[in-house]
Amino acid sequence: MAELPDVRFLTVAEVAELMRVSKMTVYRLIHAGELPAVRFGRSYRVPEGAVTEALQRPVADVG
């Protein structure tokens, strides 16, 4: 049996708190494909690494 990598999943509320945005903004990012997520039943879970990457991306092209 193959070993699964240690991936920590965050709830939408946890992602919103980390990114300092509303939960609705997180849902919009998920539905737009800008933030990968896994659906468990009726809720979404976002890999912690994806949140870290999203926070390091530039927000706007200034110049």
Image (cartoon, rainbow, N blue to C red):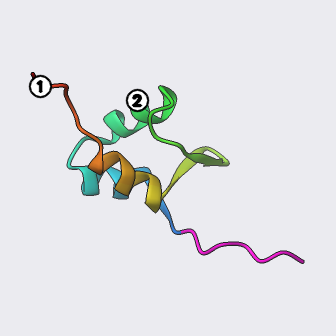
- Identity, as a three-letter code, of the amino acid under mark 2: Arg
6 shown above or below 13? below
Task: Compare residues 20 and 41 and report the one nearer the observer.
Answer: 20
Q: Secondary structure at mark 2?
A: helix
5 falls in the magenta region: yes
Disc 1 is placed on an element classified as loop
Depth check: 42 or 1 in front? Answer: 1
Residues in magenta, as a range: 1-7
Query: In the displayed structure, does residue 45 sit left or right of residue 25?
Result: right
Q: Quadrant of residue 14?
A: bottom left
- Give the answer, above or below, for where 27 lies relative to 37: above
Q: Tag 2 or tag 1, which sits nearer the N-term?
A: 2
Q: Main secondary structure of the magenta part?
A: loop
| Horizontal side of residue 46 vs 58, given as left or right | right
Q: Percent from the top left, x then y, of residue 50?
A: 45, 52
Query: For the C terminus, which image quadrant?
Result: top left
Q: Is residue 23 above or below residue 1?
A: above
Quadrant of the rendering where the N terminus is positioned: bottom right
- The amino acid pointed to by label 1 is Val
Q: Residues within 10 Å of mark 2 (few under 14, many from 20)?
A: few
Q: Which residue is mark 1?
A: 62
Between label 1 and label 2, give the one nearer the viewer. Answer: 1
Report which residue position mark 2 lands on.
28
